[in-house]
Image (cartoon, grey):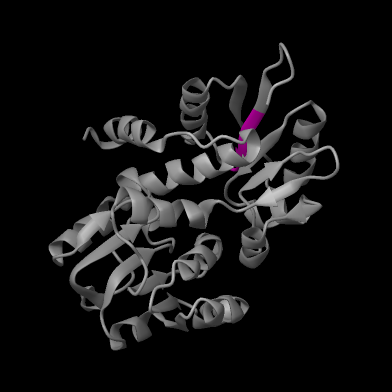
């Protein structure tokens, strides 16, 4: 909470960040909850993230969000970290506590909440295919497993990366009763079809439709791209053409922001009106 007469400062840090919708999202949350805060963007040099964060904190800021490509560095700067950030090996949220910075990763819980609450798609007992083994998958894998699907297969163009990420989550998967496997993109097509396919790969940034063939989709499957807007359009078109339901990552963006806001301010905002407003801005629906 604010000290009397003060406006608390936050920002999203990354490279690049000019496109980020986080300032608008947090401004909406602040207005809704009556919080006084200023949330901006701070583009960091690729070799100067740590110094940028330290200067921002030294200037009186209370916390920040972190986006690509600095999420792995962000975790290393914190004195304490949430279990989910430690499991992911990356952080997207920092809180500048007086006794040491605290790191969290809200990406995965944001994705799960969007699917289960906004899309009415409970994950318990389902079969999940997660495509990609980079930072995005690292951030969401733990919370996806905690939602207790029956099985989850992680595939990547270079299967060694998928194997390493699965190995780090093996005990977590067993604790939640999930059959967790890793493989190559080609292995996904050889497995039984999945009712939930999540694209966390870089294919959308390259304008590709999907890194896996349509036969990975079970009838009436949900296909989710963690990107949104124009970047997600080819994947969503591929999903619909294959008879699946398509969903982009806009809801995840809003929900992970709400988790960060809760960490900073101790209040959970209502995400529904913010998501509706963003949806109209992004695609006019």
Q: Residue at x 32, y 59 (%)?
A: 224
Query: Measured from the top left, where is residue 198 in percent x and y?
Result: 36, 64
Query: Which is nearer the eye, 42 or 60?
Result: 60
Q: Residue at x 74, y 47 (%)?
A: 102
Q: Is residue 26 visible?
A: yes
Q: Is the stretch drawn in magenta largely helix, strand or loop?
A: strand
Q: Is residue 164 visible?
A: no
Query: Which is nearer the eye, 86 or 73?
Result: 86
Query: Measured from the top left, where is residue 121 in percent x and y?
Result: 29, 59
Quarter of the picture containing the N terminus is top right
Query: Measured from the top left, where is residue 140 in percent x and y?
Result: 50, 62
Q: Residue at x 64, y 59 (%)?
A: 85
Q: Quadrant of residue 53?
A: top right
Q: Is residue 109 above or below residue 212?
A: above
Q: Is residue 144 above or below residue 255?
A: below
Residue at the top extreme of this rendering? 5
Query: Measured from the top left, where is residue 226 in percent x and y?
Result: 40, 55
Q: Is residue 92 above or below residue 108?
A: above
Which residues are drawn in magenta?
10-15
Quarter of the picture containing the C terminus is top left
Q: Magenta includes 272?
A: no
């Amino acid at each position: 909470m604010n000290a009397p007469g003060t406006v608390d400062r936050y920002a999203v840090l990354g490279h690049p960040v000019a496109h980020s919708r986080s300032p608008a999202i947090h401004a909406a949350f602040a207005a809704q909850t009556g919080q006084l805060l200023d949330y901006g963007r701070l583009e960091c040099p690729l070799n100067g993230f740590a110094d940028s964060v330290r200067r921002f904190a030294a200037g009186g800021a209370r916390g920040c969000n972190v986006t690509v490509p600095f999420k792995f560095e962000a975790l290393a700067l914190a004195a304490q970290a949430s279990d989910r950030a430690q499991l992911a090996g990356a952080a997207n949220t920092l809180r500048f506590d007086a006794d040491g910075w605290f790191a969290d990763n809200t990406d995965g819980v944001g994705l799960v909440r969007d699917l289960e609450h906004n899309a009415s798609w409970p994950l318990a007992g389902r079969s999940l295919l997660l495509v990609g083994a980079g930072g995005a998958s690292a951030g969401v894998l733990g919370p996806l497993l905690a939602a207790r699907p029956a099985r989850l297969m992680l595939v990547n163009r270079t299967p060694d990366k998928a194997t390493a990420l699965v190995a780090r989550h093996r005990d977590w998967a067993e604790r939640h009763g999930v059959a967790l496997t890793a493989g190559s993109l080609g292995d996904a097509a050889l497995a039984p079809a999945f009712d939930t396919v999540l694209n966390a790969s870089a294919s959308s940034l390259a304008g590709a439709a999907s890194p896996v063939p349509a036969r990975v989709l079970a009838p009436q499957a949900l296909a989710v791209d963690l990107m949104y807007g124009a970047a997600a359009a080819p994947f969503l078109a591929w999903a619909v053409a294959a008879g699946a339901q398509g969903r982009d990552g806009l809801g995840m963006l809003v929900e992970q922001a709400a988790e960060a806001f809760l960490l900073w301010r101790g209040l959970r905002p209502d995400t529904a009106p913010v998501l509706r407003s963003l949806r109209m801005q992004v695609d006019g629906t």
